[in-house]
Amino acid sequence: MSQFDLQALLDGNRRALAKAITLVESKLEAHREQAQGILEQILPHTGGSIRIGITGVPGVGKSTFIEAFGLYLIAQGKRVAVLAVDPSSPIAGGSILGDKTRMEELSRREEAYIRPSPAEGTLGGVAQKTRETMLLCEAAGYDVILVETVGVGQSEYQVAGMVDFFMVLMLPGGGDELQGIKKGIMELADALVINKADGESLALATMTQRQYTSAMNLLRHTSFWTPRVMTCSAQEGTNIPALWGMLVDYYFQSLQENWFQTKRAQQNRDWMHQLVNEMLLLKLSQNAQVRQLIPELERAVEQHSMTPYAAARTLIDLL
């Protein structure tokens, strides 16, 4: 890629932002080097946004919610970036990057930037690229960053580990569904939001809200914040302002408790350790002796003539 225009990125130029994200997502070593150089330079201009993770079961209306929420934030004078973590199909390797078609009105707005990220099957890959993309969006002047994840287990933990506030969208319909939510996800949530609280579902949503509230009270939460359970209708736009009000509350309480800086510092430390693990694995897989030995060791492990521990140890000793 040609010389990168850093000032254009800092001025909020969308083409410069898209180009920088493409460098971050590239598998080419030269592009990765260039991307790291850009990231080093923009670090002083990052950290000024509020980062919000959004997850929920399929069918909960995440796209409709993000569009309604995003449009409300723009009306409040905010610039909004939406990063969709889209796990690629492990079979075909591609991924359906359909977010722009699902958020039609939002994607047409000058103050919004929507970027789906193909995950390429590696959770770490998603996390790394999404984190770096987040920094680029902050440098380009976006105040609110929404990171959407498809509700599939591990990716929620990854996203919760890179945002300031983690929101889980739910459908109206208490008891049974409550059993279905993994306790871990409940513990990650800073808020449960029951979407589709409209029409005939309104009464059910209110009942669900009561059930979730008592369930949430049973969980021990480590921070100063008591997770809230709220209802909304993305379709009708009801309660969207109240949700933003809750986030503003969280933001100011976080600042008061010095929680923001502490949490982000911890996230950066964890990210560093995760990258060390990934780089070690990469280095190991690129080692010629290791590549030669692997099939032999795999056979030995399959035939029970060697323990998996001994095989792994043999490979590590080559480093």
Image: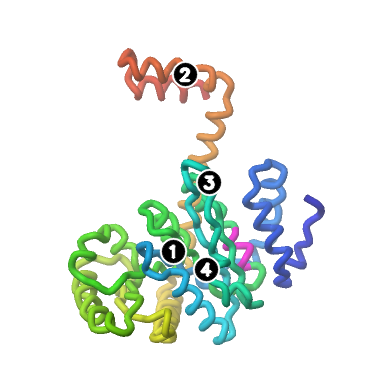
Element under label 4? helix
Tell me the residue that label 2 is attached to. 295
Please state the horizontal and vertical placement of residue 128, each as a whole percent of the image: 54, 51
Element under label 1? helix
Tell me the residue that label 3 is attached to. 120
Q: Verify CB contact (< 8 Å) between mark 1 and mark 3.
A: no
Residue 203 is one of the magenta-drawn residues: no
Packing grade of label 3 (10 A; few <14, some 14-19, many >=20) is: some
- Specify which label sits upstream in the sequence, 1 or 3: 3
Question: Which quadrant of the figure has residue 136?
Answer: bottom right
Disc 3 vs disc 2: which is toward the camera? 3
- Specify which label sits upstream in the sequence, 4 or 1: 4
Q: Is residue 267 left or right of residue 75?
A: left
Disc 2 vs disc 4: which is toward the camera? 4
Is residue 56 visible from the viewing direction of this image?
A: yes
Packing grade of label 2 (10 A; few <14, some 14-19, many >=20) is: few
Disc 1 vs disc 2: which is toward the camera? 2
Question: Which quadrant of the figure has residue 109?
Answer: bottom right
Tell me the residue that label 4 is attached to. 102
Q: Compared to 117, does 259 lie above or below?
A: below
Stretch in magenta? 133-138
Please state the horizontal and vertical placement of residue 129, each as a whole percent of the image: 57, 53
Disc 3/disc 2 C-alpha distance (Å):
25 Å
Tell me the residue that label 1 is attached to. 263
